[in-house]
Image (spheres, rainbow, N blue to C red):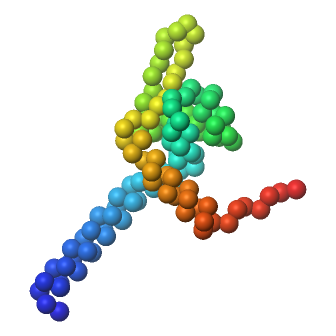
């Protein structure tokens, strides 16, 4: 193997390793149940906690609260408190959160094509 070919092979291996590490970071939060759905639910605009709970469906209040706190900490979602009265909290996507939407759309399209629908219960 030529020196150029060896360098090229090492470059590819290094890029793949970096990509794998980045993918692992992404799925460390996307792999948590509800995280992607919360981001997707905010794609249509800001929403309050109750509205998000209805949009996501099936998530407990404590888990939704945890996911929102984590997404805020990661800089994907902002939390805005309106002192009211009554006090209200609105969540919305940041620029980084909006940047995730095309990837979520591609994942949803892939799932539509390649993952079977779960069986329905009677």
Residue drawn at x 45%, y 27% is 79
Place residue 112 in its image quadrant: bottom right
Q: Quarter of the image containing the N terminus? A: bottom left
Place residue 56 in its image quadrant: top right
Instruction: Tell me if residue 12 comes above or below residue 30 in the rendering.
Output: below
Image coordinates of residue 62 in percent, x first then y, are 60, 34
Place residue 10 in its image quadrant: bottom left
Q: How many marks?
A: 0
Q: Nearer the viewer, residue 114 or 73?
A: 114
Q: Farthest residue to the bottom: give it.
A: 1
Q: Quarter of the image containing the C terminus? A: bottom right
Instruction: Tell me if residue 96 comes above or below residue 10 in the rendering.
Output: above
Image coordinates of residue 119 in percent, x first then y, are 77, 62
Instruction: Tell me if residue 95 comes above or below residue 8 in the rendering.
Output: above
Residue drawn at x 55%, y 28% is 47
Left or right relative to 24: residue 52: right
Residue drawn at x 49%, y 52% is 104
Q: Farthest residue to the right: give it.
A: 122
Left or right relative to 30: residue 49: right
Q: Nearer the viewer, residue 92 or 34?
A: 92
Q: Tell me if residue 109 can be seen.
A: yes
Q: Tell me if residue 66 can be seen.
A: no
Q: Nearer the viewer, residue 59 or 38?
A: 38
Image coordinates of residue 13 in percent, x first then y, are 27, 75
Instruction: Tell me if residue 85 comes above or below residue 114 in the rendering.
Output: above
Q: Farthest residue to the top: give it.
A: 85
Image coordinates of residue 49 in percent, x first then y, are 58, 28
């Amino acid at each position: 193997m030529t020196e150029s070919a060896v360098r090229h092979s090492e470059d590819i291996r290094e890029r793949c390793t970096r990509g794998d590490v980045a993918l692992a970071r992404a799925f460390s939060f996307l792999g948590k149940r509800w995280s992607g759905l919360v981001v997707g639910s905010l794609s249509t605009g800001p929403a309050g906690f109750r509205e998000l709970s209805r949009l996501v469906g099936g998530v407990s209040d404590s888990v939704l609260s945890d996911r929102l706190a984590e997404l805020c900490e990661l800089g994907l979602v902002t939390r805005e408190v309106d002192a009211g009265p009554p006090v209200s909290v609105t969540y919305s996507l940041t620029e980084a959160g909006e940047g995730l939407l095309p990837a979520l759309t591609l994942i949803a399209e892939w799932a539509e094509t390649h993952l079977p629908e779960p069986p329905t219960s009677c």
